[in-house]
Amino acid sequence: MNLPILINDLKFKFSEKSEYLLNGINLEVNKGEVVAIVGYSGIGKSTLCYCISGIIPNIKKGLMSGEVLINGVSTKKMNISEISQSLGIVFQNPDTQLFSPTVEDEIAFGPENFGVLREEIEKRISESLEIVGMSKHRLKNPKKLSGGEKQLIALASVLSLKPEILIFDEVMSQLDNDSKTRIKNLILKLKKEGKSIVMVEHDFDNLDVAERVLCLNNGILNRYNDKILEI
């Protein structure tokens, strides 16, 4: 059985003249596992997320070697559309993901682009909003919601595609404590459903939902050790 995420000796830098941000990353993520990644700002955590999700090399370019396998298939052999049917990514700033006039339009956008039937789309809108606890906001303009509410809508939009794998790139960094609790409870719920989750974090108070905490330092991943890194 293929692992949801398997990374073998991944190296990446943005140009010939720049240094490697990732310099030999190896990682296995199992089904139903929550893995957290910590590290200093600017050290390459988001770049790693881009590599896992296929944004690198499909959209952002640079020099990449090694491989990232999603359910046994290299991201180099898939386009973003194919990857997004198995993997969803939620970014730190939800405004970068929200652009539709209403919440339901936002959530419907992905399934519509994959040709999902309207009846199924309606079902997915309702299910996704219920999962994140935002059903009452269905007809609202996402731009008028709070930061925490926007993040939940961004997550609902990703969930509407029913991905098996989720990448959270510092999604709790701008949220209040109540919103953080909602996101963490949701992560635990998704884990119970068998979703595989990689969460990049800088706040150690958010790591209690992770089974493993890894540190990105000097371009490689190791088990977190507070003697290696203090944030």
Image: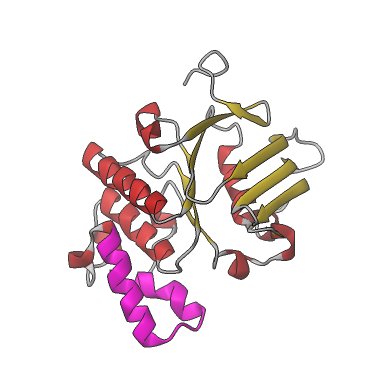
Residue drawn at x 64%, y 40% is 27
Q: Is residue 108 magenta?
A: yes
Vertical side of 163 occupied by 45: above or below: above
Left or right placement of residue 144 versus residue 218 in this view: left
Residue drawn at x 46%, y 50% is 91
Vertical side of 213 occupied by 229: above or below: above
Residue drawn at x 75%, y 33% is 19
**SS assignment for the magenta stretch, majority:** helix
Vertical side of 4 occupied by 20: above or below: above
Residue 208 appears in view:
yes
Left or right placement of residue 211 versus residue 174 in this view: right
Question: Percent x, y for residue 135?
Answer: 21, 66
Q: Residue lying furthest top in this view?
A: 227
Image colouring: secondary structure
Quadrant housing residue 155: bottom left
Question: Percent x, y for residue 38?
Answer: 51, 31
Question: Percent x, y for residue 164?
Answer: 50, 60
Q: Which region of the structure is painted magenta?
A: 103-131
Question: Percent x, y for residue 53?
Answer: 59, 55
Left or right placement of residue 65 versus residue 147 in this view: right
Residue drawn at x 62%, y 56% is 55
Q: Residue lying furthest front in this view?
A: 1
Q: Residue lying furthest left in this view?
A: 136
The N terminus: image quadrant: bottom right
Q: Is residue 119 magenta?
A: yes
